[in-house]
Image (cartoon, helix red, strand yellow):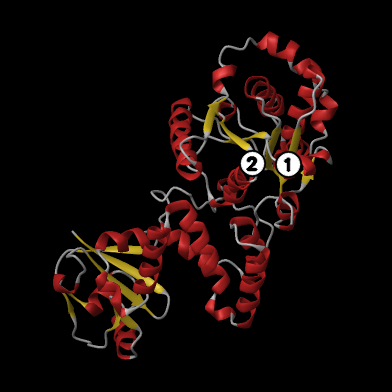
């Protein structure tokens, strides 16, 4: 397959501004840009396939520029679900530096990172209306899908003007750096085409844009921070283990789509993996392959190996081989309680509402449903002491197959 055919096969291209783009992508030599929103200090998993396009196009001989929106982050773009909260300027500036570092770690120190605040901070409002606003028709703007949806629930002038700002970004990058291609998620299509239109009218030149389908789950919900299910690409915000577990729980029905979008595996490799997965879905081969590809790209092979080891150990009797810090990072979202002194297992279960009564606690222990550090505990007279802890800091209690609780020594 050609480069363009491969992108289409992977489901990475939704709309294009011109049929000529296919030939130009195959030929190489375009200078392209993608924008990143600095309202968070890291990209998230839903954005990963879009930003992975940087690497795909680099490998095809194109030149990347990443724009981190220090100006647009102060405004916020329409999202069709309500007005964004006004972001703190100091946080935006801090996030710019963090995202810049993240981009350089992922795609190389040589990648060019720009901030649109650099050219917007001195722009006169009247000049902007005359030089930019005059060339974009309001009917054109309100017919964009995202603006239409936002207008049904109310849209501020600030968010309505967002596509003018992003369109002007494209013109500035085209004039200064020779950028002739922009891409982004399909919800950005109106903003992408505004830049193409502005350059056509002001420069009498043709530039290009394409949109990418949003990454969604089987219910069509976007994997993004606006929807409360973000998983961060920064390992200090989301550990490699958490990312591993998250991917391991991806639905089988989505795996072919995700392997195409999230990895560089070939068509033949993906077809082979999906076939093997369908024969033995309980082995979760597709999810494990995806986890390996994503974590290795983001954080390196060592982090992936560590995540695998921790996953295997956390659900086996080898858990005591892990240190307390690693376990706390892995299980930071489970229920926790403090242990102040030696205490009977029965009292510990009741006092921390793991069991509703001493009778239930005794029944659970006798039936083998209580595990201490992943080992079945059947002693009704068991006293929990610090000797039972890992690194003198924690114990892990499990009730049944899936209910975990973390005891913390103070």
Q: Earlier in the sequence, mark 2 or mark 1?
A: 1
- Placement of 395 over or under 149, stated as above or below: below
Q: Return the x and y of residue 369 as percentages of the image width and height.
A: 36, 84
Residue 73: name its quadrant.
top right
Q: Residue at x 64, y 73 (%)?
A: 272
Q: Can you give x and y, in whole percent of width and height, for residue 379 in the image?
A: 22, 88
Quadrant that contains the N terminus:
bottom right
Q: Is residue 172 above or below residue 92?
A: above
Q: CA distance from mark 2 to mark 1?
A: 8 Å
Which residue occupies the foreground of this view, 90 or 338? 90
Quadrant in the rendering for residue 77: top right
Position of 393 with respect to 262 (left or right) is left
Instruction: Work out whether residue 26 or residue 225 is closer to the camera in this orientation and state it.
Output: 26
Element type at mark 1: helix
Seen in the image, is 164 located left or right of residue 402? right
Secondary structure state at the residue bearing disc 2:
loop
* Circle 1 residues within 10 Å: few <14, some 14–19, many ≥20: some
| Residue 331 visible from this viewpoint | no
Q: What residue would you read off at disc 1? A: 27
Q: Are marks 2 and 1 in contact (CB under 8 Å)?
A: yes
Count residues near mark 2 (Cα–Cα under 10 Å), then give few for <14, some for 14-19, many for 20+.
Answer: some
Q: Residue furthest bottom?
A: 367
Q: Could one spot residue 8 in this view of the protein?
A: yes
| Residue 348 locus on image (x, y percent) | 25, 73
Q: Nearer the viewer, residue 119 or 352?
A: 119
Tell me which corner region of the image, top left, top right, bottom left or bottom right, holds residue 323.
bottom left
Q: In this image, 394 relative to 5: left or right?
A: left
Question: Which dot marks residue 61?
Answer: 2
- Please determine whether, in this image, residue 15 is positioned above or below residue 389: above
The residue shown at (43%, 60%) is 242
Seen at 54% across and 19% down, the residue is: 118
Query: Could you tell me which quadrant the C terminus lies in?
Result: bottom left
């Amino acid at each position: 397959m050609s480069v363009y055919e491969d992108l289409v096969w992977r489901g990475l291209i939704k709309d294009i501004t011109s049929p000529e783009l296919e030939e130009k992508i195959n030929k190489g030599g375009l200078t392209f840009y993608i924008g990143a929103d600095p309202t968070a200090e890291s990209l998230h998993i839903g954005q990963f396939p879009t930003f992975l396009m940087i690497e795909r196009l680099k490998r095809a001989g194109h030149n990347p520029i990443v724009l981190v929106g220090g100006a647009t982050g102060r405004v916020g773009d329409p999202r069709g679900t309500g007005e964004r909260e006004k972001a703190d300027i100091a946080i935006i500036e801090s996030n710019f530096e963090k995202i810049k570092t993240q981009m350089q770690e992922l795609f190389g120190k040589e990648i060019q990172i720009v901030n649109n605040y650099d050219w917007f901070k001195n722009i006169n409002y009247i000049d902007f209306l005359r030089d930019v606003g005059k060339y974009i028709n309001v009917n054109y703007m309100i017919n964009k899908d995202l603006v239409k949806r936002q207008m049904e629930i109310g849209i501020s002038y600030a968010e309505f003007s967002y596509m003018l700002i992003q369109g002007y970004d494209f013109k500035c990058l085209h004039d200064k750096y020779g950028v002739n291609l922009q891409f982004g998620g399909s919800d950005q299509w109106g903003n992408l085409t505004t830049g193409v239109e502005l350059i056509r009218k002001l420069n009498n030149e043709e530039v290009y844009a394409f949109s990418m389908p949003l990454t969604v789950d089987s219910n069509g919900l976007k994997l993004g921070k606006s929807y409360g299910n973000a998983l961060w690409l920064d390992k200090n915000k989301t550990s490699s283990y958490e990312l591993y577990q998250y991917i391991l729980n991806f639905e089988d029905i989505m795996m072919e789509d995700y392997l195409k979008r999230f990895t560089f595996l070939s068509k033949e490799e993906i077809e082979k993996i999906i076939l093997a997965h369908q024969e033995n879905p309980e082995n979760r081969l597709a999810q494990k392959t995806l986890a390996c590809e994503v974590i290795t790209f983001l954080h390196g092979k060592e982090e992936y190996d560590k995540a695998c080891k921790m996953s295997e150990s956390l659900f086996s009797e080898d858990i005591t081989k892990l240190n307390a810090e690693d376990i706390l990072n892995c299980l930071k979202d489970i229920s926790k309680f403090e242990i102040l002194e030696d205490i009977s297992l029965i009292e510990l279960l009741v006092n921390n509402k793991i069991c509703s009564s001493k009778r239930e606690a005794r029944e659970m222990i006798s039936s083998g449903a209580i595990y201490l550090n992943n080992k079945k505990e059947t002693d009704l007279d068991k006293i929990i002491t610090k000797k039972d802890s890992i690194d003198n800091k924690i114990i892990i209690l499990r009730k049944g197959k899936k209910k975990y609780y973390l005891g913390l020594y103070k």
